[in-house]
Amino acid sequence: MRNKSEKRKFYRYVFKEKKRLIELGVDKEELRLLCRSLSNTLNLNAERRLSQYRKDNFVSN
């Protein structure tokens, strides 16, 4: 993205959406890890950490 104003607009949109999701009760750490893995789909460590976090914290008994 070469247009700086478009990039800022996108980041403002992402910030508002993350804030909205946190207000709805989404886990902050899961949201952070999800955004990290979606922003760079080639980062295998980010995907691995997200799946490990979900496994550790959302285990159904």
Image (cartoon, rainbow, N blue to C red):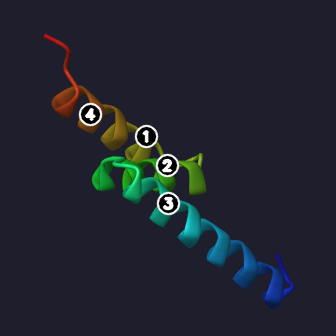
Residue picked out by circle 4: 52
Q: Amino acid at mark 3?
A: Arg
Q: Amino acid at mark 2?
A: Ser
Q: Is residue 40 visible?
A: no
Residue picked out by circle 3: 20
Q: Tell me where residue 39 sits by quadrant.
A: bottom right
Residue most extreme to the right: 3
| Badge 1 or badge 4: first in the primary sequence | 1
Q: Position of residue 42 (x, y in %)?
A: 58, 47
| Badge 4 or badge 3: first in the primary sequence | 3
Q: Nearer the viewer, mark 3 or mark 2?
A: 3
Q: Amino acid at mark 4?
A: Gln
Tell me the tag on residue 47.
1
| Badge 3 or badge 1: first in the primary sequence | 3
CA separation, marks 4 and 3?
Answer: 25 Å
Q: Nearer the viewer, mark 3 or mark 1?
A: 3
Residue at image position (43%, 40%) is: 47
**Dot 3: element:** helix
| Badge 3 or badge 2: first in the primary sequence | 3
**Dot 1: element:** helix
